[in-house]
Image (tube, helix red, strand yellow):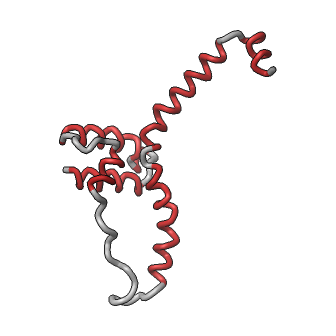
Amino acid sequence: MAVGLLLLRFGLQWLAVVGGVLVAVLRVAGPLLRLWPFLGQLRGQGGSRAAADGAGGGPGGGSSARPARMTREEALAVLGLNPGASREDVQREYRRLIKKLHPDLGGSTYLSAKLNEARDVLL
């Protein structure tokens, strides 16, 4: 019923506007959706880091070692590349994504660190 009222009042122009907005949102959000699995790690990192700092504050206790380096498959997934990607493909996708996710441009330091690590693993 609401669609019928919109058609009577505005014709089909509203459909073009809604479609244009949807396309614009998906163009921006598309690359970010590839990093969705890593956002869960970002949320869980704060609590686990505080717990690790509180337990075993000496050199023998706690886990002060760096986490394991990401695998090649994870790096390809972060950059959205296929296993046969060339060096130029890796550099192009890295540059494209870092322009959107760099902390100086309002992005996240965690996500930009993941992009840097993925680039380092693949290059």
**Residue 72 picture location, percent across and down:** 26, 54
Front residue of 71/96: it is 71
The number of numbered discs placed on residues in the rendered structure image is 0
In this image, 19 relative to 62: left or right?
right
In this image, 17 relative to 42: left or right?
right
**Residue 62 picture location, percent across and down:** 40, 84
**Which residue is at 45% across, 79% downward?**
52
**Which residue is at 52% across, 71% downward?**
47
Which corner quadrant of the image does residue 14 belong to? Answer: top right
Which corner quadrant of the image does residue 10 belong to? Answer: top right
Q: In this rendering, is residue 15 above or below 27?
A: above
Front residue of 121/21: it is 121
**Residue 122 picture location, percent across and down:** 22, 51
**Which residue is at 23% across, 54% downward?**
120
Q: In this rendering, is residue 8 above or below 29?
A: above
**Which residue is at 78% across, 15% downward?**
4
**Residue 6 picture location, percent across and down:** 75, 16
Q: Quadrant of the N terminus?
A: top right
Front residue of 25/69: it is 69
Q: In this rendering, is residue 4 above or below 79?
A: above
